[in-house]
Image (cartoon, rainbow, N blue to C red):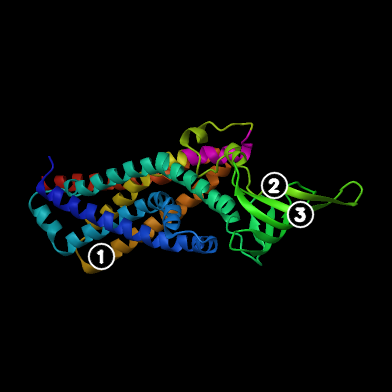
Amino acid sequence: MISRLDRYVFGQLALGLAVTTAGLVALIWLTQSLRFIQLIVQRGLSPFVFVHLTGLLLPSFVAVILPITCFIVTLFVYARLTTDRELTVMRAAGMSDAAIARPALGIAVVGMVLCWILNVWLVPASLHQFSKFEFEIRNKVAAFLLEPGVFTPIPGHITVYIQSRDKADVLHGILIEDSRQPGQPATILARTGRLVAGPNGPEVLLKDGSREQIDPKTGRLNVLSFKRNLIDLAQSSTATDDAAPKTSEATIWQLFHPNPARIPPATRRKWHAEAWRRLFTPFEVMSYVMVALIAVLRSPFRRQSSIAGLAAAVFGVMALVALGIGVDSLAARQNGLIPLILVVSAGPGLVCGMMLVRGVYRRRMVAA
């Protein structure tokens, strides 16, 4: 039965979790989004584009910090209940440590479900959309915003320089360094030109120019003059679509069933470990919450003991986070170590759960 005390403690945990997670996500978002400000400013794009681009990273931030915020909120709320003697009143009312821990276990279950949703579906989808949007900004939008007197690199091994741009958006004094063909770079000069929209992105229509290229076999300079020439400045979007997705963007199905023709063995091992990591790491929420509960419920109500218990819990979770990162790295290189991800993620929770149940059993034996 869910009692009024359960709802009271659960409400404090839920409110604290929402506020703490939102605050940490906002802080991480501010620090991580600084690297995109220069891109937005240089391209002259609106703030809405910046918010849209960086907002696609928010699910990945939440997935990383949610286990930590669950630990912080549980430790803080239960420590405050101890300081205010509310836990003492609950125990005097006949509630066991297991009953007192029910709200925290409920918030841990909610956090685990959210982590599974984020890891399996939301984070890969948002990161995939982020890569596509960033590619569009850097590749397609960038070429339309050429600045006079500046050598503008465009993804796809192209560098464009224009001397000036008039009010009619006609470009003057154009130089293009085209290195898309390995070993056969070409320099294109044109008196005037205009940017036009093509099927893959921006194209430049050149007039009265020449194309200079050194023959790799003879070493002679070949010069081709032209009256009109259309140059595609955009990297083909089909090439990026056909390429294998990044590990963070791959779906759980792709991670478990990689295409051997496109994915090398080393990457397949990394993908296999990543798939299991997404499924196992949500158990960290329960483990961290159990560590916080043990630190508060099993510590005697003395100032020095309480502080020592809280400090031990914090350092213990820090050690678990570092250990989890190391195990993930080892499992990516050697798939035989993948079960260690589950051990590190769920093991502390099982141990702390046994300690909590054992403590309840001992108190009942003493009372009897």
Q: Nearer the viewer, residue 303 or 333?
A: 333
Q: Nearer the viewer, mark 3 or mark 1?
A: 3
Q: Are marks 2 and 1 in contact (CB under 8 Å)?
A: no
Please say if 29 is above or below 240. below
What's under tag 3, amino acid-wise?
Answer: Asp
Give the distance between the C-alpha atoms of the residues marked 2 and 1, in whole angstroms. 76 Å
Residue nearer the viewer, 16 or 177:
177
Assign the C terminus to one quadrant of the image: top left
Secondary structure under tag 3 reads strand
The tag earlier along the polypeptide, 3 or 1, is 3
> Number of callouts in the render?
3
Amino acid carrying mark 2 in the image: Leu
Of helix, strand and loop, which one carries label 1?
Answer: helix
> In terms of secondary structure, where does tag 2 sit?
strand
Helix, strand or loop: magenta stretch: helix
Find the distance from the CA under tag 2 to the CA under tag 3. 12 Å
Name the amino acid type tagged 1.
Ser
In the rendered structure, find residue 208 and report the number of the disc placed on it.
Answer: 3
In reply to whether residue 198 is colored magenta, the answer given is no
Left or right? Give the position of 203 relative to 285: right
* Residue underneath mark 1: 305
Residue 271 in magenta stretch: yes
Q: Is residue 299 visible in the rendered structure shown here?
A: no
Q: Which mark is residue 230?
A: 2
